[in-house]
Amino acid sequence: MHFASTLAAVAFSAATLVSANSMTFVNLDDTKRTVYVTPTVGHAHINPIELEGRCEVKVEFPHGWIGNAYTVSEGKENVPGMLAEVTFQGWNDLTYYDVSAIVDPTDHDGVKEMYPASQAGAEVKSSFSGCKIFPCPTAYYLPDDIQTVSTDETDLIVTVGNYGGLERREEGSTYHPRNFVLGKL
């Protein structure tokens, strides 16, 4: 009997690990930031996270969690800027995410891009939201904007801070097909 209950506990733990949700916040510059995570009503509270310059921190989220995150640079007032918005295990069990500029489109030091962890290091990302330099056509600016992206992955990368040496968007940027929330994958 003890063996069966132990086996069941191990199987449950393994299933939980496989379906774990996470966002890894990657700080692109030397500025220390605090990541504030705001749940949608009824979802679990996540404590603020300190993010040192040029470091990354992985934050895990419960199954079905919905909310957003923003960063505040050290010494600055806690005011939401660009938001990293996410819904884990949403419709059709997909992850929905976007970088939203609705609250403060002038925030140029906070959240930059979001994409599935499997695309980390890829030169061309096919599933992403946000941009290196704002404004850009791949962020969410208006309610009902068609910029929310979907993926079957549950581990996301969120870049924050400033890309070294970039002061403006590159001329002639190429954007690739994306998985917008239109029911098509």
Image (cartoon, rainbow, N blue to C red):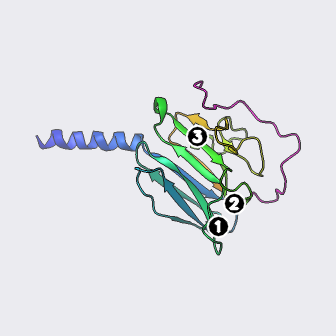
Q: Report crowding for label 3: few under 14, some 14 to 19, many 20 or more residues within 10 A (C-alpha).
A: few
The secondary element bearing badge 2 is classed as loop
Badge number at residue 53: 1
- Find the residue positioned furthest to the bottom: 75
Of the residues shown, which amino acid type is indicated by label 3? Ser
* Left or right of 116 in this view: 110: right
Q: Earlier in the sequence, mark 2 or mark 3?
A: 3
- Residue 172 rendering spot, x and y as whole percentages: 88, 39
Name the residue rendered at 58%, 44% in the picture.
117
Q: CA distance from mark 2 to mark 1?
A: 9 Å
- Find the residue positioned furthest to the front: 143
Of the residues shown, which amino acid type is indicated by label 1? Gly
Of the residues shown, which amino acid type is indicated by label 2? Gly
Q: Main secondary structure of the magenta part?
A: loop
Judging by the rendered image, the residue that carries numbered circle 2 is: 161
Badge number at residue 118: 3
User: Between residues 4 and 113, which one lies in front from this camera angle?
Assistant: 113
Q: CA distance from mark 1 to mark 3?
A: 23 Å
User: Between residues 68 and 49, which one lies in front from this camera angle?
Assistant: 68
Q: Tags 1 and 3 in contact by the CB under 8 Å rule?
A: no
Q: Tags 2 and 3 in contact by the CB under 8 Å rule?
A: no
Q: Tags 2 and 1 in contact by the CB under 8 Å rule?
A: yes
